[in-house]
Image (cartoon, rainbow, N blue to C red):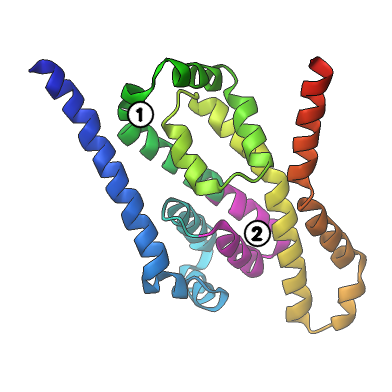
Amino acid sequence: MESNKNRRGPTIKAAVLVIFLVAAIVIARFTPLREHLTVERLGLLLEAAGPWAPVAYIGTYAAGVCLFIPGTLLATVGAAIFGPYYGFLYVWVGAMLGASLAFFIGRYLGRDFAASLVCDKLGKYDEAIERNGFATVLYLRLVYFPFTPMNFGMGLTRVRFLDYFSGTALGIIVGTFIFTFFVGTIKDVWSSGQWGGLLSWKILFSLGLFVFSFFIPKTIERLRVSQKTWIA
């Protein structure tokens, strides 16, 4: 009887997690919410927030991460509104806050149930993730593993939160800077109306970084394969 009660708790929490994830996807994909996530509408909202605009944006980004709203959309809005530098800072903080919230949701609601399903073979992978948490998270972030699913999924594993947080913080910082710098710089030129600025070093540099970002996953994967070959 008691064993059934012990199993009931994790099962109920796992069911709540599934309901939450399904509801989040439905809200993001099939409601008018996404229509409000535009530069114009968010700009008006943030203008009304005054000095609290960065906090409002970071909170919106964090909630968006948990609701499966595409990060590129949220980052584009942030870079366009705040510019390449502050935009980078606010996007990175919002992404980290959202990633942490999603991790804890997955950890609290799904970890016990996931642990009960782990067999001996999967248990070895679970232990390996715990031992090499930082490296695993960093690698997956650098190869652009889907952001939000990974946030929830890592919460189901034995990875330590500190390893997850630091791996995420370091793993997304390059891609976030490249993207926000590119979008923010283009938006600055667009707003100024000085189209000659499109040939400035800043634009060319941001464009070069943006193109380079597409090669990061392949570069990391090749280095990983080369390292395995060398060790073997």
User: In the rendered image of this protein, does residue 158 appear above or below residue 171?
Assistant: above
Q: Are marks 1 and 2 in contact (CB under 8 Å)?
A: no
Identity of the residue drawn at 79% across and 84% down: 193
Which residue is situated farthest in the bottom direction here? Answer: 193
The one nearer the camera, 120 or 198, is 120
Q: Secondary structure at mark 1?
A: helix
Identify the amino acid type marked 2: Gly
Q: Position of residue 82 (x, y in %)?
A: 64, 65
**Magenta region, main secondary structure:** helix
Q: Which residue is mark 1?
A: 114
SS at circle 2: helix
- For the residue pair 92 and 126, the one nearer the viewer reads as 126
- Judge from the rendering whether residue 232 lies leftward or rightward of residue 69; answer left or right: right
Q: Position of residue 136 (x, y in %)?
A: 61, 28
Q: Percent position (x, y) of residue 65?
A: 48, 52
Residue closer to the observer: 97 or 149: 149
Task: Give the left or right position of residue 117, taking residue 35 as reference.
Answer: left
Question: Is residue 194 placed above or below 70 in the rendered structure?
Answer: below
The quadrant of the rendering that contains the C terminus is top right
Mark closer to the chain start, 1 or 2 = 2
User: Residue 99 at x, y = what percent?
Assistant: 50, 43
Q: Residue at left 81%, top 22%?
A: 229
Mark seen at residue 32: none
For label 2, count other residues whose C-alpha is less than 10 Å away and answer few (under 14), some (14-19) or many (20+): many
Vertical position of residue 115 compared to residue 213: above or below: above
The kind of residue tagged 1 is Ala
Indicate which disc residue 87 carries: 2
Q: Which residues are magenta?
A: 70-94
- Give residue 84's quadrant in the image: bottom right
